[in-house]
Amino acid sequence: MDAHPSHFAQIYSVYAHVPFCFHKCHYCDFYSLAEPRGDASRHQPFARALLGELGALSESYRLEPTTVFVGGGTPTLMGADVWSSLLYDLQSLLDRSKLQEFTVEANPETVTEDLASVLVDGGVDRFSLGAQSFQPDLLKALERWHDPASVGRSVGILRKAGVSRLNLDMIFAIPGQTLEDLDRDLEAVLALEPDHVSCYGLTYEPNTPLTTKLRLGRVDRADEELERAMYERVMERLGAAGFEHYEISNWARPGQRCLHNMAYWENRDWLGVGPSAASHVGGRRWKNEAHLGRYLEGCPEPPVVDVEELNAAQRRGEQLMLRLRLIEGAPLPWLDALLPDGDWRWGEIKMLISMGLLERTGTHVRLTRAGLFVGDDVVARLL
């Protein structure tokens, strides 16, 4: 099946996947390639391939995004020279007249003054720093190799460069972590005054080294009661500090929600470029093959896998599942328009309400406080 719809659809969001890392973290299941420090030989060819892919896509889509997000991997492993040429050439491929947010993910150890200046001058206005924890023993449990002090140093560099929006990524329920450890991490986060915090309970993804260690008994998973208490603590501390809890794992200062992720949760159309990047346009989904070599060989039209066209019922389920991840939930008029009479999901919604996992307010159906603790499982039941 051809991945690309025949109509000239407008794309609201663009995601670019940079697969390079200097080390593969043991919990990560994203496609990435560990490479020796100082080996940048593939960075410039990759950047050219990325631009080539976008150029080819511009023949089928209107690339007028409101958001751009560059993730990985470690995008900031690429040097300032590569980024400078990449951002310059992007100007001719993307119509930025509607752009509201341009995010780049960063590893704290890779942020330099030169790189920050190039990125900000090139239009990047939001950074997402992978802090995860501020305690060396917990970082070691995750096989994260950065120095906790580098997070604050990176924040200082980015703020000095003029970055207007900053997210910190955090993880809780790390093997060996206590509530006191979490309190110290939250204090460190708040001291850096980010605009946004993403805080996730550790997930043991299939085929990761951490999951192998768990299976072999080399690490102990946080018990359910402790993980629940940690999530409660995150909600309490960030809420008291003035952050809006707007999605299961995301908190923002007023007006600082991640617009790119909102496009996912609102089920808008987006394009992904780079190896392993996924796309969604008009109910059709596809994914670039997760292989850098074949990506470089195949561009400007890299090999595509997992092409799927959702039928109407599947699209309704996906829209509902994504919308219910938001704390405000699904507006009642939107829900009535989405689900026809007789759709089986109405019965499932009633059952989840009776179980105390969903609630119906005067305006929305949303997760309850109890539902938030098992939010992924609840929303998956409505697919």
Image (spheres, grey):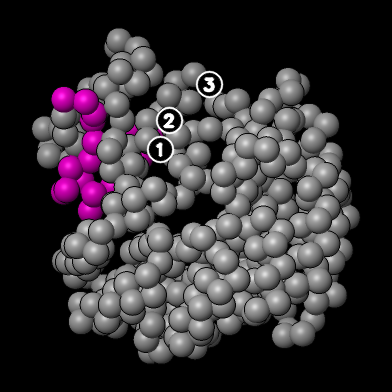
Give the distance between the C-alpha atoms of the residues marked 2 and 3, in whole angstroms.
Answer: 12 Å
Quarter location, residue 278: top right
Mark pair 1, 3: CA separation: 17 Å
Pinpoint residue 75: horizontal percent, then vertical percent. Answer: 66, 66
Residue bearing the label numbered 1: 322
In the image, residue 4 above or below residue 6: below
Q: Nearer the viewer, residue 90 or 353?
A: 90
Contact between labelled residues 3 and 2, with CB atoms less than 8 Å apart? no
The image's mark for residue 311 is 3
Please tell me whether mark 2 or mark 3 is closer to you in this view: 2
Q: Residue at x 57, y 66 (%)?
A: 162
Q: Name the kind of residue labelled 3 in the image.
A: Asn
The magenta stretch is 362-383
Indicate whether 227 appears above or below 281. Answer: below
Q: Is mark 3 on a helix, strand or loop?
A: loop
Q: What secondary structure is marked by label 1?
A: helix
The quarter of the image holding the C terminus is top left
| Residue designated by label 2 | 319
Q: Left or right: 17 with respect to 223?
A: right
Q: Which of marks 1 and 3 is nearer the N terminus?
A: 3
Q: Nearer the viewer, mark 1 or mark 3?
A: 1
The amino acid type of the residue labelled 1 equals Leu
Q: What percent of the width, then of the height, locates residue 254?
A: 34, 50
